[in-house]
Amino acid sequence: MSNIKGQTNDTLIAICPLTFDRYMRIALSLARRNLGQTWPNPAVGALLVKDGQIIAQGWTARGGRPHAETEALGDAGDLAKGATLYVTLEPCTHHGKTPPCTDAIIKAGIARCVIACRDPNPLVNGKGIEQLRNAGIEVIEDVCKNEAAAINCGFFFVIEKKRPYVALKLATSRDGKIAGGEKRWITGEQARAYGHLLRSRHDAIATGIGTVLADDPLLTCRLPGLEDRSPVRVVFDRQERLPRDSQLAKTADTIPVWVMAQPLPEALAALAQKGITRLLVEAGQKLSTAFLLNGLIDRIYWFRAPIEIGEGGLSATSEAIDLAHWQRIDHITLQPDTLDILECSPA
């Protein structure tokens, strides 16, 4: 059951928390629509409900603006007066490139605002909620809080840890190998399609110069209909050896390529300063191991094919992954392969 704050007992009798959850889950689905496309801003969804009917919806546009709340309010027009606004993140109160969303909410005459989680940005954190309440708007917090926080884990990481949320993608044989002498696909079509979907949902994708020199990858999203959602390509290269005739260099005018020559922690801090909140690592053994040994991986997407390569293959990482430090949060069958999604366990 949702945690409802700041309400009288009479109000609690009249409101069913399950109704809040139902509408908020719709708002969460809206927030996911542009995940990977809104950086440096969070991906937010907003829903306006009046007399039991959804009257408008909005989500953060690509590039981070317009914000979800103003999109929904603009869609509703005068109908917004007296409505309930469901929003997946606390509305902003500060002037940036756009006016505060709280001002627009108050001006529209919203009666109630249901918020999934607070914005940890010091410019907002609790101030938006306070402003709405001071304007006489009923505010209900923490509805589907964990789900909302998961969507914007990268945004939260940049604020709290000064680096992006980092996911490592591994595609191996059943015995954990990534190569068997000849260059060939290990996983099947479904697994490869899911991998491209992951690319579309991250702000940036990273690899090492060794992989670039060996494989000349393109690192774009090539799912039909999502080709325009390719992430920024990042190459970790201390000696700046990226070939001018590589696929990455030749397509840099249309899809950015950033070369990072700093050590990993400094490079991630620099990416965060550039606005990157979610980074997907698709690399060879050396860089994957370096990320793991530095404690810089927060999630692993581990695709496994039902084959064994044996002693002739190369291990995915030069150090064994200690699964005691990881929690499996999902297991997906992608015939004929499987995908385990692991998250780093709290220390």
Image: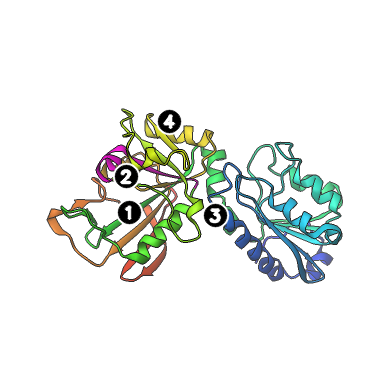
Q: What residue type is labelled 2?
A: Ser
Q: Which amino acid does label 3 sit on?
A: Ala
Q: Badge 1: how crowded within 10 Å, few (<14), some, or many (20+)?
A: many
Q: How far apart are marks 3 and 2 (CA)?
A: 23 Å
Q: Name the residue under label 2.
A: 288
The reply to whether callout 1 and callout 4 are in contact (CB within 8 Å) is: no
Say which residue appears at 85% left-offset and 62% top-offset. Answer: 79
Secondary structure beneath dot 3 equals helix
Q: Can residue 328 be seen in this view?
A: no
Q: How far apart are marks 4 and 2 (CA)?
A: 17 Å
Q: Which image quadrant for residue 301?
A: bottom left
Q: Which residues make up the magenta segment?
A: 203-215
176 with respect to 9 (left or right): left
Q: Distance between the residues labelled 1 and 4?
A: 24 Å
Secondary structure beneath dot 2 equals helix
The reply to whether callout 1 and callout 2 are in contact (CB within 8 Å) is: yes
Secondary structure beneath dot 1 equals strand
Mark 4 or mark 2, earlier in chain = 4
Mark 1 or mark 2, earlier in chain = 1
Q: How far apart are marks 1 and 2 (CA)?
A: 9 Å
Q: What residue type is labelled 1?
A: Leu
Q: Mark 1 points at which residue?
A: 170
Question: Mark 3 against mark 2, which lies toward the viewer?
Answer: 2
Residue 261 picture location, percent across and down: 37, 29
In the picture shown, does residue 315 fall above or below 207? Answer: below
- The disc label shown at residue 150, or none: 3
Q: Badge 4: how crowded within 10 Å, few (<14), some, or many (20+)?
A: few
